[in-house]
Image (cartoon, helix red, strand yellow):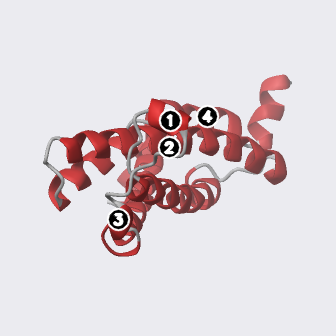
Amino acid sequence: MKNKLIAFAEKHSEIWKFIKFSFTGASTSVLELGVFLFLQYLVFKSLNEVPVTDNAILSFLGIEYKGYMYSYCISAIIGYAAAYIMNRKLTFKADANPILSTVIYAIMVICTIAFNTWFGAFLGTWVKNNGWDNVIVEMIMKIIVMTVPTIWTYPLNRFVIHRKKRQNDQIKS
């Protein structure tokens, strides 16, 4: 079995990288989901009905409740930090400049967290305003919100952030 797995990984290296990226994403998503539920139902529970009335931009974006916004933002930061470390070390075995990689990753994460915070808070507001706010529906919404960014995070991680110097040097030669 081990030899078959190694042969598959060598023959289909890009597919294997995406599988590892997906596994890392699933693992860190479990962490992110756990943190989200902890924050949503314990730490910020009292803020789930506190409106965001002091910020015109958030109101314009459809973010109406502070608890949802804080829960999505903090859980996303924790999940992305864990994903960075795991993808750099395990998935892509990157050896590119770690400072540059971290800066580019941070920019991607800031944009992704801004999107996740908006999208999650928007969906949370929509769910609450329709009377569907319960653990199951909110977990499904969180999983959807966490999955959508894969559209841009995999290509950026694979080809921009977690490069291998040796591959880049070979391409130039």
Considering depth in this image, is 137 or 100 the residue closer to the camera?
A: 137
Residue nearest the observer in this picture, 91 or 135: 135
Left or right, 150 with reference to 104? left
The Cα atoms of the two marked residues, 4 and 2, are separated by 13 Å
Which residue is found at the position 50% from the left and 43% from the top? 17
- The residue that disc 1 covers is 14
Dot 1: element: helix
Q: Which residue is mark 2?
A: 17
In what element is the residue under mark 4? Answer: helix
Q: Residue furthest front?
A: 54
Q: Which mark is residue 40?
A: 3
In the picture of the structure, the residue carrying the numbered disc 4 is: 156
Marks 2/3: CA distance?
33 Å
Distance between mark 3 and mark 1 Cα atoms: 37 Å
Q: Looking at the rendering, in which quadrant would you find the C terminus?
A: top right
Mark number, residue 52: none
**In the image, which is nearer the foreground, mark 3 or mark 1?**
3
Residue type indicated by callout 2:
Lys
Q: Residue at x 31, y 60 (%)?
A: 1
Image quadrant of residue 150?
top left
Residue at the extreme left? 131
Are the residues at dot 3 and dot 4 in contact (C-beta closer than 8 Å)? no
Asked if disc 1 and disc 4 are in contact, CB closer than 8 Å, the reply is no
Residue lying furthest top in this view? 172
N-term mark: 1 or 4: 1
Residue 12 appears in the figure: no
Amino acid at the residue labelled 3: Gln
